[in-house]
Amino acid sequence: KQKTAYEISTRDWSSDVCSSDLEDELSPSAAPRWLRGIFFANLVAQIAIVVTGGVVRLTGSGLGCPTWPECVPGSYVPTARQEEAWHKYVEFGNRTLTFVLGLLAIAAAVGAVAWAISRRRQGRSARGPLIVLAFVPLLGTFAQAVLGGITVLTGLNPAAVAGHFLVSMAIIAGCVVLWVRSGESGDHPRTWLVRPEVRWLGRLLVAVTFVVVVLGTVVTGSGPHSGDADTEARFGFDPRTVSWLHADVVLLFLGLTIGMLLVASVVDAPRRTRTCAWTLLIIALIQGAIGYSQYFSGLPWVLVAIHMLGASLVWTFSIFLLMSLRTRGTIPPATTR
């Protein structure tokens, strides 16, 4: 007898990860390991660029290369005659990492298309949605390059800086979805592994996480780290007020995460959902400790940079958690109870 959607458990085939990670022999339609490796590398690199971009701003190196796309007029690389001292190397290093992101993004798109062509020749589905998702890193990297130029040309306007960060969060979400979907056995049908109430809790958790991230950019844009050692470009909000508003929403986020843990245990959700929820909660608690530490210690740039890494990981695992509530394609018989 076929199980209903929320009665299906995936503990037998994805017990220790937040995403479906089927073995190739169990899921012949899943992307090959080399391609999934490229997709995962894109996810890691996108998180890395967030941190290095934060270091640029936190060390006051945002205008270390005062022009774009050149570093200085007439040169794409730092020159000895620049007045920006070591800041020019910090900013140039971050720009260089953008090219690495571009190469990985191209590899993801080309690899997905090549795999689709190979599948077509074998008379199998090309998995079109996966190809579309594979272009997210490439399009996102291009958009970030443009936004980076706008950020520099506007003198590190806080709205431009915040937009730069939020686009990175969107790309990271796309990379998570790409990696998870590439390990599934197909694109249709979509099967929910939990009850509708749990689905909406997962969606609400992601929405609140996004609000936390947005408020984090407002807090940063209202604080002392403008991004340039000589220029202060900030929002006109009181740092203390927006910091406590940010903290209040974080408490709501923690409550929802704990609620997801409890609900996942009661309804016997897939083990990967519980594993991912625990991971998210642990990262969030560490992130909260770092947040309060940086606030009461005068916002040292090292702690702020670590906090940015934590924000990226919290966002990443909130998407992983939501994705763990469903699957696509044919579910292997061993996954049902």
Image (cartoon, grey):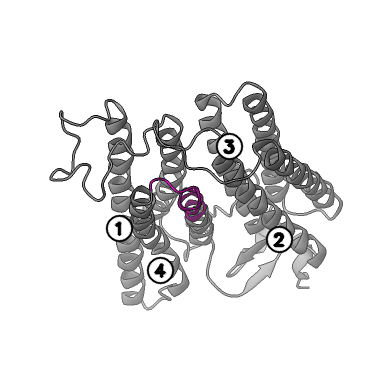
**Callout 2, which amino acid?**
Arg
- Which residue does the image show at 44% across and 72% down from the upper left? 127
Residue at the extreme top? 297
State which tag comes first along the sequence, 3 or 1. Answer: 1
State which tag comes first along the sequence, 1 or 2. Answer: 1
Q: In front here: 317 or 34?
A: 317
Mark closer to the observer (2, 4): 2
Residue at the extreme right? 266
Look at the image and say whether residue 229 sits in the magenta stretch.
no
Give the residue at mark 3.
Answer: 310
Look at the image and say whether residue 165 sits in the magenta stretch.
yes
- Which residue does the image show at 42% across and 62% down from the upper left? 136
Residue 106, disc:
1
Give the residue at mark 4.
Answer: 131
Mark closer to the observer (4, 3): 3
| Neighbour tally class for label 3: few under 14, some 14-19, many 20 plus, Cα within 10 Å | many
**Callout 4, which amino acid?**
Ile
Mark closer to the observer (3, 1): 3
SS category of the residue bearing label 1: helix
SS category of the residue bearing label 3: helix
Residue 90, disc:
none
Residue 119, percent across and down? 36, 71
Give the magenta range: 155-168
Say whether residue 13 is visible: no
**Callout 1, which amino acid?**
Ile
- Which residue does the image show at 71% across and 61% down from the upper left? 203
Give the residue at mark 2.
Answer: 203
